[in-house]
Image (cartoon, rainbow, N blue to C red):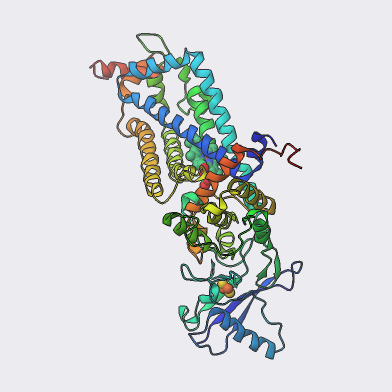
Amino acid sequence: MNLLQSIWRSSLGKKYIMALTGAGLFLFVTGHMVGNLQFFLPPEAINRYGHFLKTTPEILWPARIGLLAMVALHIASAVTLSAKNKAARPQPYAGKTKDLGASVASRTMLMSGLIVLAFIIYHLLHFTAVVDSINGAGFDFDQLYEPNSGHPDIYAMIVCGFSVWYVALFYLVAVGLLCVHLGHGLAAMFQSLGLKDHVWGPRIGAFAKAASLAIFLGYASIPVSVLVFGHGKAYADVVKAGIVPDAAGAVKALKGGAK
Amino acid sequence: MKVKLKVWRQKNRDASGEFKTYQSPELNPSMSFLEMLDVMNEQLAAGGEEPIAFDHDCREGICGTCSLVIDGKPHGPHKGVATCQTYMRSFKEGDEIVVEPFRAHPFPLVKDLVVDRKAFDRIQHAGGFISVRTGAAPDANSIPVPKEAADLAMDAAQCIGCGACVAACKNASAMLFVSAKVSHLGLLPQGQPERYRRVKAMVDQMDAEGFGNCTVTGSCEAVCPKEISLDFIARMNRDYLVALLKGDAKKPSGGGAG
Ligand code: HEM
Ligand code: FES
């Protein structure tokens, strides 16, 4: 039988796919976070970065296609394996069951994964496709241009996006669930690939906890800084002034004049 | 002491089952759980009711025949102990003890608390052996085995194939069992010639039987009466990956010395 077929048909083969695509997605999520943390530099930094990515199709498209393939394979294996798992116990226990050492994260991987998937779709519509009807801000983020360069203003878009409290909250919940998913998934990944033993087990466990927590803190810091600390608000109000009439007052305020 | 027993009764695979609750006669706290069931059954038989069917054999924790999910945990309340080695002193006067059979599609129910675990035998038949002639007992040191490998192989060989791992796993996965059998032989020099063929055949049989897949919850390890480690599953995953990449062995090209 050919190799790809035997991988896809065997339970362990699918676990390898899940682990490898999970590892790929983890690397992406880490890189994406580091890129996003430029939000804490002056606005030009993340705007330049965004402009570079968007105007470099030879990086953008391979990355997009690769990510889509990884997400598709990850989910296809998750869903087919889960279906087999359900079928392996058609009659559940009639009496009270116990967790028997299984952590909440390990028991809810499919759920946390599917909610993260829903979030990914929203996130792409929100900031990549820039669909204005779902941003909750009441105007089109595509109209935000950086004053100096005239390029799309990603920094202002992030500020305006996270100024809508329920959107920011959804982001926080989603990265929280991603943290839970990775807290178990990163350790499971090494187990699935057979890269674990009594020496590396505890090290891998610690890595999974630390890495997933770092991912959470890194991503959560952005909506929290906007919503709670008003980070970037003054700048975004200036950028917004061009397109949103009632933002003009804010510009005056920024320039030192009374309202 | 006396306890209440809420136990699963089911005539056969096709009948529908239900819990029935029985009051036990006076019990000695030093009785094993299975002896308690024996006493219970004598009382049931005396009253003209069908005794509770349950599996048992060695009653000393080495054969893997006893089963039962007791109060939601395979093999009862203790860690590293089989049902036959669980004693009534672990329960309190007046407790209601809930007893169910192991539940998994590849372990079809036979009657009451008895399930058919031949799926494990078929996995063993697929590759859980070595096919060289062992002959007479060789000199102890004629095949050197590193102490660490021998110890680890011995840990894996502890598996008594009871199926508690499957019963406990939320996915009804048999990977702890299969990994123990794969590792036990795969760690020893005598097991090397068939190492990759073995893991491939056993995992494929495991899949064919319809067991679920490991999601690394650790429940199997937590209930295993022999405390087999999850690390063996990693070892099996590693060997299976190598086996997949190696592919099937080259077919002999015919001819040969007459
Ligand atoms: C950014 C997105 C995601 C990342 C970084 C990620 C990462 C991971 C990693 C590293 C694993 C461990 C692989 C293994 O067990 O061998 C994993 C497992 C898993 N993922 Fe994801 N995942 C993501 C999204 C999703 C989505 C959208 C789903 C939805 C179906 C999902 C469902 C699962 C399931 C069911 C497992 C198996 C759990 C287990 O083995 O215990 N994941 N994921
Ligand atoms: S009866 Fe043999 S292990 Fe329990």
Please indicate whether residue B66 sits to the left or right of residue A144 in the image.
right
> Residue A227 at what x, y percent from top left?
35, 33
Q: Nearer the viewer, residue A254 or A193?
A: A193
> Residue A175 at what x, y percent from top left?
43, 38
Q: Which residue is pictured at 36% across the width and 10% down the height?
A: A147
Please indicate whether residue B47 sits to the left or right of residue B178 in the image.
right
Quadrant assignment, res B56: bottom right
Is residue A13 positioned above or below B137 on the image? above
> Residue B244 at what x, y percent from top left?
61, 40
Quadrant assignment, res B132: bottom right
Quadrant assignment, res A162: top left
Q: Quick check: which quadrant has ligand 2?
A: bottom right
Q: Nearer the viewer, residue A240 or B212?
A: B212
Q: Which residue occupies the extreme front position in the image?
A: B258
> Residue A53 at what x, y percent from top left?
45, 17
Q: Which residue is pictured at 39% across the width and 29% down the height?
A: A33
Is residue A111 positioned above or below B100 on the image? above
Q: Nearer the viewer, residue B139 or A43?
A: B139
Placement of the C terminus of chain B among the 4 image quadrants: top right
Q: Is residue A144 visible?
A: no
Number of on-image labels: 0
Q: Is residue A195 visible?
A: yes
Q: Which residue is pictured at 60% across the width and 81% down the height?
A: B37
Please indicate whether residue B254 sits to the left or right of residue B8 in the image.
right
Q: Which residue occupies the extreme top position in the image?
A: A149
